[in-house]
Image (cartoon, rainbow, N blue to C red):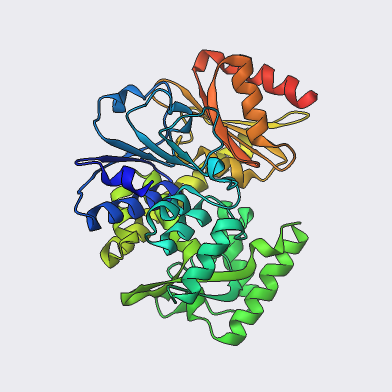
Amino acid sequence: MKELLLNFKNPTIIHHYDTDGISSATILYDFLISNGIEPKLLCMKGLNRFNIDQIKDINEKILVDLGTHYANVLKDAIIIDHHKPSVNASNLINAHYLNFDGSIEISSSGLVHFITGNKPEIGLVGAVGDRQWPFIGYNKRLLEKVLLEKKIYSKTDLTLYGKFNRPLFSMLSYFFRDFLLDYRQAIKFLEDLEIKQKDGERWRSYSDLNPEEKEILIKAIIEKAYFMDMDIQDIYNEIYYLNYGGLYNYIDIEELSTIINSVGRQGKSNVGIDILKGNEKALVQGIEISKIQQRKLVNALRYAEENLLEFDKFNVLDGRNVIDSSIIGIVTSMINKSTTIGIAKEENYLKISIRSNTYDVSELISKIVKEMDAEGGGHTRAGGLVIEEDRLEKFLDIIKKLLEK
Protein backbone atom coordinates (compact mmCIF):
# COMPACT_ATOMS: atom_id res chain seq x y z
CA MET A 1 0.00 0.00 0.00
CA LYS A 2 2.86 2.34 0.82
CA GLU A 3 4.30 1.81 -2.67
CA LEU A 4 1.07 3.05 -4.27
CA LEU A 5 1.55 6.42 -2.58
CA LEU A 6 5.21 6.64 -3.55
CA ASN A 7 4.35 6.16 -7.23
CA PHE A 8 2.92 9.68 -7.38
CA LYS A 9 5.06 12.55 -8.70
CA ASN A 10 2.96 15.68 -7.97
CA PRO A 11 -0.03 14.51 -5.90
CA THR A 12 -2.80 16.58 -4.31
CA ILE A 13 -3.94 15.49 -0.85
CA ILE A 14 -7.68 16.15 -0.63
CA HIS A 15 -8.86 15.96 2.97
CA HIS A 16 -11.89 16.60 5.17
CA TYR A 17 -11.98 19.79 7.23
CA ASP A 18 -12.42 18.22 10.67
CA THR A 19 -9.72 17.08 13.12
CA ASP A 20 -9.41 13.60 11.67
CA GLY A 21 -9.17 14.91 8.11
CA ILE A 22 -6.51 17.48 9.01
CA SER A 23 -4.59 14.92 11.09
CA SER A 24 -4.72 12.43 8.20
CA ALA A 25 -3.44 15.03 5.76
CA THR A 26 -0.60 16.00 8.12
CA ILE A 27 0.63 12.42 8.52
CA LEU A 28 0.46 11.79 4.77
CA TYR A 29 2.07 15.13 3.87
CA ASP A 30 4.97 14.49 6.21
CA PHE A 31 5.41 10.96 4.83
CA LEU A 32 5.51 12.14 1.20
CA ILE A 33 7.86 15.05 1.95
CA SER A 34 10.25 12.71 3.76
CA ASN A 35 10.30 10.58 0.60
CA GLY A 36 11.10 13.48 -1.72
CA ILE A 37 7.53 14.07 -2.97
CA GLU A 38 6.02 17.54 -2.43
CA PRO A 39 2.21 17.34 -2.48
CA LYS A 40 -0.41 20.07 -2.73
CA LEU A 41 -3.21 20.27 -0.16
CA LEU A 42 -6.93 20.80 -0.71
CA CYS A 43 -9.41 20.91 2.18
CA MET A 44 -13.13 20.15 1.64
CA LYS A 45 -16.21 20.25 3.87
CA GLY A 46 -17.23 16.94 2.34
CA LEU A 47 -17.59 15.22 -0.99
CA ASN A 48 -20.96 14.87 -2.70
CA ARG A 49 -22.65 15.11 -6.07
CA PHE A 50 -22.91 18.87 -5.69
CA ASN A 51 -19.14 19.47 -5.53
CA ILE A 52 -17.40 16.41 -6.99
CA ASP A 53 -16.75 18.23 -10.27
CA GLN A 54 -14.34 20.50 -8.37
CA ILE A 55 -11.80 17.68 -8.09
CA LYS A 56 -12.47 15.44 -11.11
CA ASP A 57 -9.82 17.12 -13.25
CA ILE A 58 -7.09 17.09 -10.59
CA ASN A 59 -4.33 14.67 -11.57
CA GLU A 60 -2.75 12.36 -8.99
CA LYS A 61 -5.20 12.78 -6.14
CA ILE A 62 -5.16 11.10 -2.75
CA LEU A 63 -8.36 11.48 -0.72
CA VAL A 64 -8.25 11.04 3.07
CA ASP A 65 -11.21 10.90 5.48
CA LEU A 66 -13.71 11.31 2.64
CA GLY A 67 -14.60 9.83 -0.73
CA THR A 68 -15.43 6.20 0.12
CA HIS A 69 -18.81 6.38 -1.64
CA TYR A 70 -17.16 7.82 -4.77
CA ALA A 71 -14.40 5.25 -5.20
CA ASN A 72 -16.03 3.87 -8.38
CA VAL A 73 -16.36 7.38 -9.82
CA LEU A 74 -12.86 8.62 -8.91
CA LYS A 75 -11.04 5.59 -10.30
CA ASP A 76 -7.81 7.56 -10.81
CA ALA A 77 -7.60 8.46 -7.10
CA ILE A 78 -6.36 6.60 -4.04
CA ILE A 79 -8.94 6.90 -1.27
CA ILE A 80 -7.99 6.26 2.37
CA ASP A 81 -11.04 6.33 4.64
CA HIS A 82 -12.58 4.76 7.74
CA HIS A 83 -16.28 5.30 6.97
CA LYS A 84 -18.35 2.20 6.27
CA PRO A 85 -18.10 1.48 2.52
CA SER A 86 -21.10 1.09 0.22
CA VAL A 87 -18.95 0.15 -2.78
CA ASN A 88 -16.09 -2.23 -3.46
CA ALA A 89 -13.19 -0.74 -5.41
CA SER A 90 -9.52 -1.55 -5.88
CA ASN A 91 -8.49 2.10 -5.34
CA LEU A 92 -10.20 2.25 -1.93
CA ILE A 93 -8.14 1.55 1.19
CA ASN A 94 -10.84 1.29 3.83
CA ALA A 95 -10.60 0.37 7.51
CA HIS A 96 -13.46 -2.12 7.19
CA TYR A 97 -11.62 -3.99 4.40
CA LEU A 98 -8.70 -4.44 6.82
CA ASN A 99 -10.93 -5.94 9.54
CA PHE A 100 -11.01 -2.76 11.62
CA ASP A 101 -14.28 -1.19 12.77
CA GLY A 102 -13.84 2.34 11.45
CA SER A 103 -16.56 3.64 13.77
CA ILE A 104 -14.80 2.83 17.04
CA GLU A 105 -11.30 1.39 16.72
CA ILE A 106 -9.49 3.32 13.98
CA SER A 107 -9.97 6.72 12.35
CA SER A 108 -8.65 7.85 8.97
CA SER A 109 -5.55 9.34 10.58
CA GLY A 110 -4.88 6.02 12.32
CA LEU A 111 -5.35 4.29 8.97
CA VAL A 112 -2.84 6.64 7.29
CA HIS A 113 -0.36 5.78 10.06
CA PHE A 114 -1.11 2.07 9.55
CA ILE A 115 -0.14 2.45 5.89
CA THR A 116 2.86 4.78 6.26
CA GLY A 117 4.15 4.00 9.77
CA ASN A 118 4.35 7.75 10.27
CA LYS A 119 3.35 10.01 13.23
CA PRO A 120 1.35 7.62 15.48
CA GLU A 121 0.68 10.38 18.02
CA ILE A 122 -1.19 12.43 15.38
CA GLY A 123 -3.22 9.33 14.57
CA LEU A 124 -4.54 9.49 18.13
CA VAL A 125 -5.37 13.21 17.82
CA GLY A 126 -7.56 12.32 14.83
CA ALA A 127 -9.21 9.47 16.74
CA VAL A 128 -10.09 11.82 19.62
CA GLY A 129 -11.53 14.28 17.08
CA ASP A 130 -13.85 11.53 15.84
CA ARG A 131 -14.95 10.67 19.39
CA GLN A 132 -13.35 7.21 19.29
CA TRP A 133 -13.11 7.08 23.04
CA PRO A 134 -12.03 5.13 25.03
CA PHE A 135 -9.26 3.78 22.81
CA ILE A 136 -9.81 0.21 21.65
CA GLY A 137 -8.56 -1.90 18.75
CA TYR A 138 -5.89 -0.24 16.63
CA ASN A 139 -6.20 3.03 18.57
CA LYS A 140 -5.17 1.16 21.72
CA ARG A 141 -2.15 -0.25 19.90
CA LEU A 142 -1.22 3.29 18.84
CA LEU A 143 -1.56 4.47 22.44
CA GLU A 144 0.70 1.72 23.77
CA LYS A 145 3.30 2.63 21.13
CA VAL A 146 3.38 6.38 21.84
CA LEU A 147 3.37 5.88 25.63
CA LEU A 148 6.37 3.60 25.27
CA GLU A 149 8.12 6.13 23.03
CA LYS A 150 7.22 8.94 25.51
CA LYS A 151 5.55 10.98 22.78
CA ILE A 152 2.47 11.03 25.03
CA TYR A 153 2.00 10.63 28.78
CA SER A 154 -1.19 10.09 30.77
CA LYS A 155 -2.82 11.10 34.05
CA THR A 156 -6.34 11.23 35.50
CA ASP A 157 -7.81 14.73 35.36
CA LEU A 158 -10.69 16.85 34.10
CA THR A 159 -11.36 16.28 30.42
CA LEU A 160 -12.80 19.77 29.86
CA TYR A 161 -11.44 21.93 27.07
CA GLY A 162 -9.57 25.11 28.00
CA LYS A 163 -7.61 23.93 31.04
CA PHE A 164 -4.47 25.74 29.89
CA ASN A 165 -5.55 28.76 27.91
CA ARG A 166 -9.07 29.82 28.93
CA PRO A 167 -10.53 31.53 32.03
CA LEU A 168 -12.14 29.11 34.46
CA PHE A 169 -15.70 30.23 33.61
CA SER A 170 -14.95 29.76 29.91
CA MET A 171 -13.58 26.26 30.48
CA LEU A 172 -16.80 25.30 32.30
CA SER A 173 -18.93 26.66 29.46
CA TYR A 174 -17.45 24.15 27.03
CA PHE A 175 -19.20 21.32 28.85
CA PHE A 176 -22.24 22.70 30.67
CA ARG A 177 -24.85 24.07 28.33
CA ASP A 178 -26.40 26.42 30.92
CA PHE A 179 -22.98 28.02 31.44
CA LEU A 180 -22.44 28.31 27.69
CA LEU A 181 -25.73 30.16 27.29
CA ASP A 182 -25.03 32.45 30.27
CA TYR A 183 -21.41 32.78 31.41
CA ARG A 184 -22.53 34.69 34.54
CA GLN A 185 -23.86 31.42 35.95
CA ALA A 186 -20.40 29.91 35.59
CA ILE A 187 -18.82 32.90 37.36
CA LYS A 188 -21.33 32.56 40.23
CA PHE A 189 -20.66 28.79 40.40
CA LEU A 190 -16.96 29.56 40.99
CA GLU A 191 -17.72 32.37 43.44
CA ASP A 192 -19.85 29.99 45.52
CA LEU A 193 -16.85 27.65 45.69
CA GLU A 194 -14.72 30.61 46.84
CA ILE A 195 -12.22 29.99 44.06
CA LYS A 196 -10.29 33.12 43.13
CA GLN A 197 -10.89 33.82 39.44
CA LYS A 198 -8.37 36.60 38.79
CA ASP A 199 -4.76 37.47 39.52
CA GLY A 200 -4.91 41.24 39.22
CA GLU A 201 -6.44 41.87 35.79
CA ARG A 202 -5.58 38.42 34.43
CA TRP A 203 -8.19 35.66 34.44
CA ARG A 204 -6.91 32.46 36.03
CA SER A 205 -7.08 29.15 34.17
CA TYR A 206 -7.39 25.64 35.62
CA SER A 207 -3.63 25.17 35.28
CA ASP A 208 -3.12 28.15 37.65
CA LEU A 209 -5.04 26.52 40.52
CA ASN A 210 -3.27 24.95 43.49
CA PRO A 211 -4.00 21.26 44.34
CA GLU A 212 -6.59 22.15 47.00
CA GLU A 213 -8.50 24.44 44.62
CA LYS A 214 -8.43 21.78 41.91
CA GLU A 215 -9.83 19.20 44.32
CA ILE A 216 -12.71 21.52 45.31
CA LEU A 217 -13.51 22.36 41.68
CA ILE A 218 -13.35 18.75 40.45
CA LYS A 219 -15.73 17.61 43.19
CA ALA A 220 -18.22 20.39 42.39
CA ILE A 221 -18.10 19.70 38.63
CA ILE A 222 -18.70 15.98 39.15
CA GLU A 223 -21.64 16.71 41.47
CA LYS A 224 -23.19 19.08 38.92
CA ALA A 225 -22.73 16.54 36.13
CA TYR A 226 -24.29 13.80 38.27
CA PHE A 227 -27.42 15.85 38.94
CA MET A 228 -27.67 16.69 35.23
CA ASP A 229 -27.56 12.94 34.48
CA MET A 230 -24.30 13.28 32.54
CA ASP A 231 -21.68 10.58 32.13
CA ILE A 232 -18.96 11.26 34.73
CA GLN A 233 -16.36 9.55 32.55
CA ASP A 234 -16.90 12.33 30.00
CA ILE A 235 -15.70 14.83 32.61
CA TYR A 236 -13.06 13.11 34.72
CA ASN A 237 -11.01 10.41 33.10
CA GLU A 238 -7.60 9.37 31.84
CA ILE A 239 -6.08 12.32 29.96
CA TYR A 240 -3.34 12.01 27.37
CA TYR A 241 -0.82 14.79 26.88
CA LEU A 242 1.20 15.21 23.70
CA ASN A 243 4.87 16.14 24.04
CA TYR A 244 4.53 19.38 22.06
CA GLY A 245 7.62 21.24 23.25
CA GLY A 246 8.23 25.00 23.44
CA LEU A 247 6.07 27.30 25.54
CA TYR A 248 3.22 24.76 25.80
CA ASN A 249 5.47 21.78 26.60
CA TYR A 250 2.74 19.12 26.96
CA ILE A 251 -0.80 19.71 25.68
CA ASP A 252 -3.96 17.69 26.29
CA ILE A 253 -4.71 15.91 22.99
CA GLU A 254 -8.45 16.46 23.43
CA GLU A 255 -7.81 20.18 23.78
CA LEU A 256 -5.52 20.07 20.76
CA SER A 257 -8.18 18.17 18.82
CA THR A 258 -10.77 20.88 19.58
CA ILE A 259 -8.42 23.62 18.38
CA ILE A 260 -7.70 21.72 15.14
CA ASN A 261 -11.43 21.21 14.60
CA SER A 262 -12.07 24.93 15.11
CA VAL A 263 -9.48 26.13 12.62
CA GLY A 264 -10.67 23.62 10.01
CA ARG A 265 -14.26 24.76 10.33
CA GLN A 266 -13.18 28.39 10.07
CA GLY A 267 -11.49 27.69 6.72
CA LYS A 268 -7.95 27.65 8.17
CA SER A 269 -6.97 24.01 7.77
CA ASN A 270 -3.43 25.10 6.87
CA VAL A 271 -3.10 26.48 10.41
CA GLY A 272 -4.22 23.11 11.77
CA ILE A 273 -1.56 21.30 9.75
CA ASP A 274 1.10 23.74 10.98
CA ILE A 275 -0.05 23.17 14.57
CA LEU A 276 0.33 19.42 14.17
CA LYS A 277 3.79 19.95 12.70
CA GLY A 278 4.76 21.64 15.99
CA ASN A 279 4.56 25.28 14.93
CA GLU A 280 4.02 27.24 18.16
CA LYS A 281 2.93 30.46 16.42
CA ALA A 282 0.26 28.49 14.60
CA LEU A 283 -0.94 27.06 17.93
CA VAL A 284 -1.33 30.58 19.35
CA GLN A 285 -3.27 31.54 16.21
CA GLY A 286 -5.41 28.40 16.53
CA ILE A 287 -6.33 29.25 20.11
CA GLU A 288 -7.56 32.67 18.97
CA ILE A 289 -9.55 31.14 16.10
CA SER A 290 -11.19 28.70 18.52
CA LYS A 291 -12.57 31.70 20.44
CA ILE A 292 -14.43 32.77 17.29
CA GLN A 293 -15.85 29.26 17.01
CA GLN A 294 -16.98 29.48 20.64
CA ARG A 295 -18.93 32.67 19.97
CA LYS A 296 -20.63 31.06 16.95
CA LEU A 297 -21.62 28.07 19.08
CA VAL A 298 -23.08 30.28 21.81
CA ASN A 299 -25.27 32.12 19.28
CA ALA A 300 -26.30 28.86 17.61
CA LEU A 301 -27.26 27.23 20.93
CA ARG A 302 -29.28 30.26 21.95
CA TYR A 303 -31.15 29.95 18.66
CA ALA A 304 -31.64 26.22 19.27
CA GLU A 305 -33.07 26.85 22.75
CA GLU A 306 -35.91 28.88 21.23
CA ASN A 307 -36.42 27.08 17.92
CA LEU A 308 -36.00 23.34 18.53
CA LEU A 309 -39.08 21.48 17.27
CA GLU A 310 -39.93 18.41 19.35
CA PHE A 311 -41.84 15.52 17.79
CA ASP A 312 -42.75 12.13 19.20
CA LYS A 313 -39.66 10.20 18.06
CA PHE A 314 -37.18 12.95 17.17
CA ASN A 315 -36.37 16.65 17.34
CA VAL A 316 -35.59 19.03 14.48
CA LEU A 317 -33.37 22.09 14.52
CA ASP A 318 -33.90 24.05 11.31
CA GLY A 319 -30.82 26.27 11.18
CA ARG A 320 -31.08 27.34 7.56
CA ASN A 321 -29.53 30.79 7.03
CA VAL A 322 -28.94 31.08 10.80
CA ILE A 323 -26.46 28.35 11.80
CA ASP A 324 -23.30 27.86 9.76
CA SER A 325 -23.17 24.46 8.04
CA SER A 326 -19.66 23.96 9.47
CA ILE A 327 -21.02 23.79 13.04
CA ILE A 328 -24.51 22.31 12.61
CA GLY A 329 -23.15 18.86 13.57
CA ILE A 330 -21.52 20.20 16.74
CA VAL A 331 -24.69 22.06 17.75
CA THR A 332 -26.85 18.99 17.07
CA SER A 333 -24.53 16.93 19.29
CA MET A 334 -24.63 19.50 22.10
CA ILE A 335 -28.44 19.60 22.19
CA ASN A 336 -28.12 16.17 23.85
CA LYS A 337 -31.65 14.93 23.10
CA SER A 338 -32.35 11.28 22.29
CA THR A 339 -32.53 11.80 18.50
CA THR A 340 -31.96 15.19 16.91
CA ILE A 341 -31.83 16.29 13.28
CA GLY A 342 -29.99 19.51 12.44
CA ILE A 343 -30.48 21.29 9.12
CA ALA A 344 -28.16 23.90 7.61
CA LYS A 345 -27.91 25.52 4.19
CA GLU A 346 -24.90 25.11 1.97
CA GLU A 347 -24.51 26.98 -1.32
CA ASN A 348 -27.00 24.95 -3.34
CA TYR A 349 -28.07 22.11 -1.07
CA LEU A 350 -28.93 21.25 2.54
CA LYS A 351 -26.58 19.62 5.01
CA ILE A 352 -28.39 17.29 7.42
CA SER A 353 -26.77 16.17 10.69
CA ILE A 354 -28.29 13.33 12.73
CA ARG A 355 -27.34 12.47 16.31
CA SER A 356 -28.97 9.74 18.38
CA ASN A 357 -28.54 7.84 21.64
CA THR A 358 -31.40 5.53 20.66
CA TYR A 359 -30.94 4.40 17.06
CA ASP A 360 -27.98 3.27 14.94
CA VAL A 361 -27.49 6.42 12.87
CA SER A 362 -25.39 4.70 10.19
CA GLU A 363 -28.13 2.14 9.60
CA LEU A 364 -30.80 4.84 9.63
CA ILE A 365 -28.96 6.90 7.01
CA SER A 366 -28.47 3.82 4.81
CA LYS A 367 -32.25 3.31 4.75
CA ILE A 368 -32.92 6.98 4.01
CA VAL A 369 -30.39 6.96 1.16
CA LYS A 370 -32.14 3.95 -0.43
CA GLU A 371 -35.61 5.45 0.00
CA MET A 372 -34.91 8.84 -1.57
CA ASP A 373 -31.73 8.40 -3.63
CA ALA A 374 -29.78 10.76 -1.36
CA GLU A 375 -26.19 10.39 -0.22
CA GLY A 376 -24.58 10.29 3.18
CA GLY A 377 -23.09 8.10 5.86
CA GLY A 378 -21.81 8.06 9.40
CA HIS A 379 -21.20 6.07 12.53
CA THR A 380 -23.31 4.42 15.21
CA ARG A 381 -24.32 7.63 17.02
CA ALA A 382 -23.61 10.37 14.47
CA GLY A 383 -23.86 10.91 10.74
CA GLY A 384 -25.21 13.10 8.01
CA LEU A 385 -26.37 13.45 4.45
CA VAL A 386 -26.93 16.10 1.79
CA ILE A 387 -30.16 16.73 -0.11
CA GLU A 388 -31.70 19.32 -2.40
CA GLU A 389 -33.70 21.90 -0.44
CA ASP A 390 -36.97 21.07 -2.21
CA ARG A 391 -36.71 17.47 -0.93
CA LEU A 392 -36.63 18.39 2.77
CA GLU A 393 -40.30 17.59 3.34
CA LYS A 394 -39.86 14.17 1.75
CA PHE A 395 -36.80 13.51 3.93
CA LEU A 396 -38.74 14.36 7.11
CA ASP A 397 -41.64 12.12 6.06
CA ILE A 398 -39.27 9.20 5.44
CA ILE A 399 -37.41 9.55 8.75
CA LYS A 400 -40.69 9.85 10.63
CA LYS A 401 -41.95 6.56 9.10
CA LEU A 402 -38.62 4.80 9.75
CA LEU A 403 -38.54 5.81 13.41
CA GLU A 404 -42.18 4.89 13.95
CA LYS A 405 -41.31 1.35 12.85
> Residue 255 at what x, y percent from top left?
47, 63
The one of 309 and 329 positioned closer to us in this rendering = 329
The one of 51 and 223 positioned closer to us in this rendering = 51
* Location of residue 68 with respect to 211 vertically, above or below: above
* Location of residue 395 with respect to 144 vertically, above or below: above
* Location of residue 95 with respect to 68 vertically, above or below: below
Asked where in the image residue 133 lies, by quadrant, the reply is bottom right
> Residue 121 at what x, y percent from top left?
43, 64
> Residue 108 at what x, y percent from top left?
46, 47
Residue at left offset 49%, top offset 69%: 145
Residue at left offset 72%, top offset 57%: 230
> Residue 301 at what x, y percent from top left?
56, 44
* Location of residue 397 with respect to 157 vertically, above or below: above
On the rendered structure, is 106 left or right of 109?
right
Task: Classify the position of the C terminus by image quarter.
Answer: top right
On the rendered structure, is 223 left or right of 73?
right
The one of 337 and 271 positioned closer to us in this rendering = 271
Residue at left offset 40%, top offset 21%: 50
Query: Total number of numbered labels?
Result: 0
The one of 271 and 195 positioned closer to us in this rendering = 271
On the rendered structure, is 265 left or right of 237?
left
Residue at left offset 54%, top offset 63%: 141
On the question of residue 293 being in view, the answer is yes
On the question of residue 345 being in view, the answer is no
